[in-house]
Image (cartoon, grey):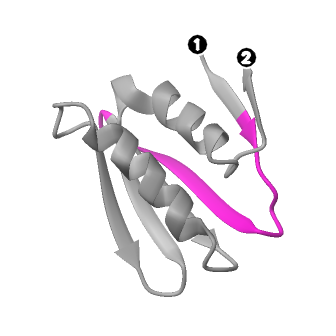
Amino acid sequence: MKVAYKYVEKLLELHETANGDDFEFTLTFVDHKWKEKIEKIREYFDANNILTDIHFYIHPNNRIQIIVRKDFYNEFIIQLFRQQIVEAIKWV
């Protein structure tokens, strides 16, 4: 089942691409408020014992690269929603 999501384009630039069996997200925020939200997502995934579920790479200029394993895709999108990084989720 495919997931569609919406976010505020004035506050965030978000790109999603398939990367083999994974998904790669590049998020660029206009301000520094994202750090706490991303840290909460990271803590959520660190709480499980699966080391390869998600990888975070912090880059300069408020840009973050996140690689998500295919079977954790929906869970990651839900965490983006919980942290109000995305504002709507719809299964299509």
Instruction: Specify whether 87 is left or right of 49.
Output: right
Q: Give the residues drawn in magenta, as a range.
A: 5-21
Which amino acid is tagged 1? Met
Residue depicted at x 33% and y 59%: 56
Res. 47 image quadrant:
top left
Instruction: Specify whether 88 is left or right of 56.
Output: right
Residue depicted at x 45% and y 47%: 41
Q: Residues within 10 Å of mark 2 (few under 14, many from 20)?
A: few
Residue depicted at x 67% and y 52%: 85
Judge by depth and name the residue closer to the eye, 62 or 35.
Answer: 35
Quadrant placement of the N terminus: top right
Quadrant placement of the C terminus: top right
Q: Secondary structure at mark 1?
A: loop
In the displayed orientation, state which residue is furthest to the top: 1
Picture coordinates of residue 40, whole percent (x, y): 46, 51
Which amino acid is tagged 2? Val
Q: Identify residue for label 2.
A: 92
Task: Kindly indicate whether the residue at mark 1 contacts the one at mark 2 (C-beta within 8 angstroms).
Answer: yes
Gap in Å between the C-alphas at discs 2 and 1?
A: 7 Å
Judge by depth and name the residue closer to the eye, 75 or 42.
Answer: 42
Instruction: Specify whether 20 is left or right of 37.
Output: left
Vertical side of 24 occupied by 58: above or below: below
Picture coordinates of residue 43, whole percent (x, y): 35, 48
Res. 33 image quadrant:
bottom right
Sequence-first disc among 2 and 1? 1
Q: Secondary structure at mark 2?
A: loop
Instruction: Find out whether residue 19 is within the magenta segment.
Output: yes
Q: Identify residue for label 1.
A: 1
